[in-house]
Image: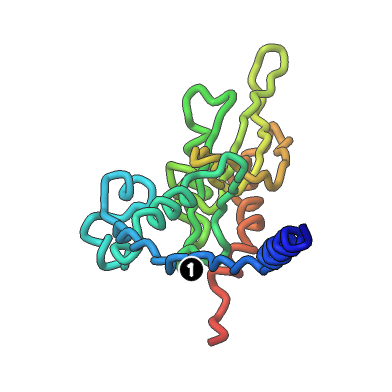
C-alpha cells in the first residue's frame, strides 16, 4: 500500500512540475516593409479656348508666358481666380497727367430749348477755341464732360433770351462682376441767368476753362526725373 502511494505521489510531482513549466513565448511575424505607391504623373497644362476666354492668352503666347509649365490643376485654379468676383466693384476714371501734353479731351452735350441747334453750335465753337481743348464724341474718349441744358425765357409769349444750367463731370467706367457701364463723377453745377445777354456760350467756355486748370497743371507739369 505504501509503495502505491509513493508511486502516486511521484506522478503528482511530475505533473505539477510540468504544469508549472513556463510556456515558450511565441514570436509575432515581422510586418512587411512599407512600399510607397508610385505617384501618378502630373498632367501638364495645355491651352484651350477656355484659357483664351478666362486669361486672354492666345495659343501662341501660352508657352511664351510659361503657362505650359503649370500642371492642369494649377492652370484651373489660375483661371478660377481670374473670374469676375460678383462682390467686387471697380470705378475706373482718367488719371491726371495721362492726356497728351497740353491736350484735354472734352465731351459736350446740349439739351433743352434749342430747336435749331444754333446755341449748341455757339457753345461748341467757344469751347473748342479754348487752348489745348479737343472736343470728343464719346465718354470713353473724354477727360472731362460738360452738360448744358438751355431754358428759353419769354415775356408775353415773346422770347427775350436764353438761360442755361450746366454741370461738369469726370467720365468713368463702373465695373461690377465684369459688366462695364459708363458713369460720371459730378463736378461743378451752375447757371447762366442773363437772359438778355449775348455771352451765354462765352461765359460757359470761361467757366469750363477755370474747371480745367487742375488738368492743365497735371499735363504740363515738368518731369522730376
| Residue ranking furthest to the bottom | 225
Asked whether 40 or 215 is in front, the reply is 40
Write down the quadrant of residue 110 in the picture. top right
Residue 134 to residue 200: above or below: below
Query: What residue is drawn where x is 57% and y is 39%?
Result: 86
**125 or 4: nearer the eye?**
4
Q: Is residue 52 left or right of residue 80?
A: left
Residue 152 in percent (x, y) is at 64, 24
Answer left or right for 63 relative to 131.
left
**Front in this rendered view, residue 88 or 59:** 59
- Nearer to me, 136 or 51: 51
72, above or below 158, in the image: below
| 31 left or right, relative to 170 | left
Residue 205 appears in the figure: yes
Q: Quarter-wise, where is residue 4 in the image? A: bottom right
The local crowd at label 1, few if under 14, some if 14 to 19, many if 20 or more residues have their Cα within 10 Å, is few
Residue 168 in the image: x percent, y percent?
64, 45
Residue 162: x and y in percent read 64, 29
Amino acid at each position: 500500500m505504501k509503495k502505491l502511494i509513493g508511486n502516486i505521489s511521484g506522478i503528482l510531482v511530475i505533473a505539477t512540475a510540468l504544469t508549472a513549466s513556463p510556456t515558450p513565448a511565441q514570436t509575432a511575424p515581422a510586418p512587411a516593409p512599407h512600399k510607397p505607391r508610385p505617384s501618378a504623373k502630373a498632367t501638364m497644362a495645355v491651352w484651350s479656348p477656355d484659357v483664351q476666354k478666362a486669361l486672354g492668352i492666345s495659343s501662341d503666347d501660352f508657352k511664351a508666358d510659361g503657362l505650359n509649365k503649370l500642371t492642369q490643376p494649377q492652370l484651373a485654379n489660375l483661371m478660377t481666380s481670374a473670374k469676375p468676383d460678383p462682390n467686387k466693384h471697380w470705378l475706373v476714371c482718367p488719371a491726371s497727367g495721362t492726356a497728351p501734353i497740353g491736350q484735354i479731351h472734352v465731351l459736350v452735350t446740349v439739351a433743352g430749348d434749342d430747336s435749331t441747334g444754333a446755341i449748341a453750335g455757339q457753345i461748341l465753337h467757344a469751347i473748342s477755341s479754348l487752348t489745348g481743348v479737343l472736343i470728343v464724341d464719346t465718354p470713353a474718349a473724354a477727360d472731362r464732360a460738360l452738360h448744358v441744358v438751355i431754358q428759353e425765357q419769354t415775356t408775353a409769349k415773346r422770347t427775350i433770351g436764353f438761360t442755361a444750367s450746366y454741370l461738369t463731370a469726370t467720365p468713368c467706367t463702373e465695373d461690377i462682376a465684369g459688366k462695364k457701364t459708363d458713369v460720371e463723377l459730378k463736378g461743378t453745377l451752375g447757371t447762366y441767368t442773363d437772359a438778355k445777354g449775348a455771352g451765354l456760350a462765352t461765359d460757359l467756355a470761361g467757366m469750363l476753362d477755370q474747371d480745367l486748370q487742375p488738368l492743365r497743371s497735371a499735363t504740363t507739369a515738368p518731369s522730376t526725373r
